[in-house]
Image (cartoon, helix red, strand yellow):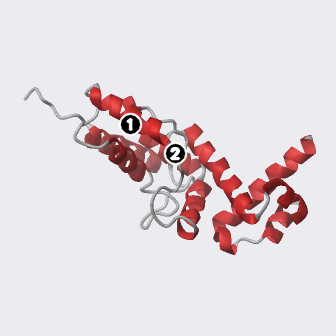
């Protein structure tokens, strides 16, 4: 059983590299099998198809991102920084999501209720009711905008892509900027004036 799990993990790792680099259509099961020191029959037994393997890879990385960046509606600036750090630690996820967007779901939600999307917007609505977040913004718009800001330097950025090889000071500057921008974005209006 342990060997099967190790093989499955090698396949997922090899498939991550292949799909992130080439997308679903460009990925080759032969290359994945060779890199994983496995065979196609074993891969199909685990995942059913190349598309099933892609789904498993994307789900694995989505879970890792969600675990690394839990939403705290009382601290959306901190959430934005956690999303930035999670994408910095796992740049493959954004590339995989980009391929899924390009090759599968061109518009609309990419992930159906991605691990409690509705719960996240409900938490933001609750924070709005408690006066912590501007109530004139929709919870959905708040969530999407905070995520978009956090992904400004993601691997599919049209301008600058962050890298773990950059100086720590560069990342700290971006984290401070994210905290400031998100805090300003969501700040409840001062009604005492």
Q: Nearer the viewer, residue 145 or 158?
A: 145
Query: Are discs 2 and 1 less than 8 Å apart at CB?
Result: no
Q: For the residues marked 2 and 1, what is the alpha-carbon distance in whole angstroms? A: 19 Å
Image height of 116 relative to 159, above or below: above
Q: Name which quarter of the figure residue 94 lies in.
A: bottom right
Name the residue located 45 percent from the left edge and 64 percent from the top edge.
107
The answer to whether one can see residue 132 in this image is no
Local SS, label 1: helix
Give SS at disc 2. loop
Disc 2 versus disc 1: nearer the observer: 2
Q: Quadrant of the N terminus?
A: top right
Residue 3 image-quadrant placement: top right
The residue pinned by badge 1 equals 76
Seen from the viewer's position, the closer of residues 153 and 102 is 102
Q: Residue at 41% across / 44% down in the picture?
A: 175
Q: Which residue is mark 2?
A: 113
Please name whichever residue, 6 or 40, is drawn nearer the observer in this view of the structure: 40
Q: Position of residue 119 (x, y in %)?
A: 46, 35
């Amino acid at each position: 059983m342990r060997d099967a799990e190790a093989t499955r993990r090698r396949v997922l790792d090899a498939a991550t590299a292949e799909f992130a680099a080439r997308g679903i259509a460009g990925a080759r099961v032969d290359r994945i099998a060779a890199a994983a020191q496995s065979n196609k029959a074993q891969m199909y037994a685990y995942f059913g198809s190349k598309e099933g393997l892609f789904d498993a890879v994307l789900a694995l990385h989505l879970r890792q991102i969600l675990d690394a960046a839990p939403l705290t509606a009382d601290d959306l600036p901190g959430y934005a920084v956690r999303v930035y750090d999670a994408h910095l630690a796992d740049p493959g996820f954004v590339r995989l999501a980009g391929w899924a967007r390009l090759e599968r779901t061109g518009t609309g939600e990419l992930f159906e209720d991605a691990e409690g999307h509705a719960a996240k917007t409900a938490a933001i609505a609750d924070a709005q009711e408690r006066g912590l977040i501007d109530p004139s913004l929709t919870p959905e718009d708040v969530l999407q905008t905070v995520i978009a800001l956090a992904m400004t330097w993601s691997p599919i950025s049209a301008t600058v892509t962050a890298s773990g090889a950059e100086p720590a000071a560069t990342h700290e500057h971006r984290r401070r900027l994210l905290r400031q921008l998100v805090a300003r974005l969501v700040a409840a209006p001062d009604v005492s004036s």
